[in-house]
Image: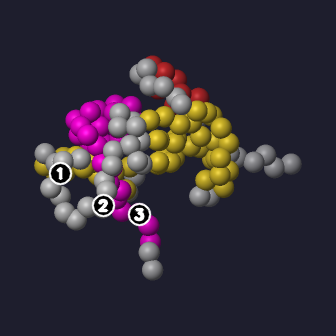
């Protein structure tokens, strides 16, 4: 019945601060629709930024900044991601640690966006075949 995820809404207290973080720190493309509609492009999925005081309807019953826990797949090895984050003075909260992803074992690091949302950046763990 369903084929995938089209977009996900992230509730934020400051759209310009969120745009800066997700574009500068994570390298996402930014698409402005208007002052209150900003999309961050991640492959074929949009992360839509909604301001907490928006009049956009319909919306979640209790949109709350800092309530998101999102796992993102990295194209780069995690040590390169960590060096990038260190250069930008972004704290890694945990990791790298082994986890289970949607398609098998992954290794992850965890950080937070400016609103406190938990972001997991992961890479698949390749099993060694003998």
Number of numbered discs on residues = 3
- From the viewer's side, name the closer residue of 57 and 27: 57
Q: Residues within 10 Å of mark 1 (few under 14, many from 20)?
A: few
Distance between the Cα atoms at labels 2 and 3? 17 Å
User: Bounds of the magenta span?
Assistant: 3-30
Q: Residue at x 61, y 33 (%)?
A: 95
Mark number displayed over residue 116: none
Q: Which residue is mark 2?
A: 60
Q: Residues within 10 Å of mark 3 (few under 14, many from 20)?
A: few
**What element does badge 1 sit on?**
loop
Mark number displayed over residue 5: 3
Residue 122 position, x and y percent, is: 56, 43
- From the viewer's side, name the closer residue of 36 and 26: 36
Distance between the Cα atoms at labels 1 and 3? 23 Å
Image-quadrant location for residue 59: bottom left
Q: Is residue 90 above or below residue 48?
A: above
**What element does badge 3 sit on?**
loop
- From the viewer's side, name the closer residue of 114 and 30: 114
Mark number displayed over residue 54: 1
Q: Does 8 appear in magenta?
A: yes
Q: Nearer the viewer, mark 1 or mark 3?
A: 1
**What element does badge 2 sit on?**
loop
Query: Is any part of residue 2 visible from this angle?
Result: yes
Q: Is residue 18 above or below residue 47?
A: above
Whether the residues at callouts 2 and 3 have beta carbons within 8 Å, the answer is no
Q: Residue at x 44, y 75 (%)?
A: 2
């Amino acid at each position: 019945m369903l084929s995938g995820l089209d977009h996900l809404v992230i509730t934020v207290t400051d759209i310009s601060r969120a745009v800066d973080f997700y574009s500068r720190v994570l390298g996402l493309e930014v698409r402005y629709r208007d002052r209150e509609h900003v999309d961050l492009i991640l492959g074929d999925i949009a992360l839509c930024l909604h301001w907490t005081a928006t009049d956009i309807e319909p919306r979640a019953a209790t949109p709350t900044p800092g309530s998101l826990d999102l796992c993102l797949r990295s194209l780069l090895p995690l040590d390169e991601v960590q060096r990038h984050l260190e250069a930008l003075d972004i704290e890694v909260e945990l990791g790298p640690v082994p986890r289970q992803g949607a398609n098998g074992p992954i290794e992850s690091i965890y950080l937070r966006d400016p609103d406190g949302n938990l972001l997991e950046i992961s890479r698949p763990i390749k099993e060694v075949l003998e």
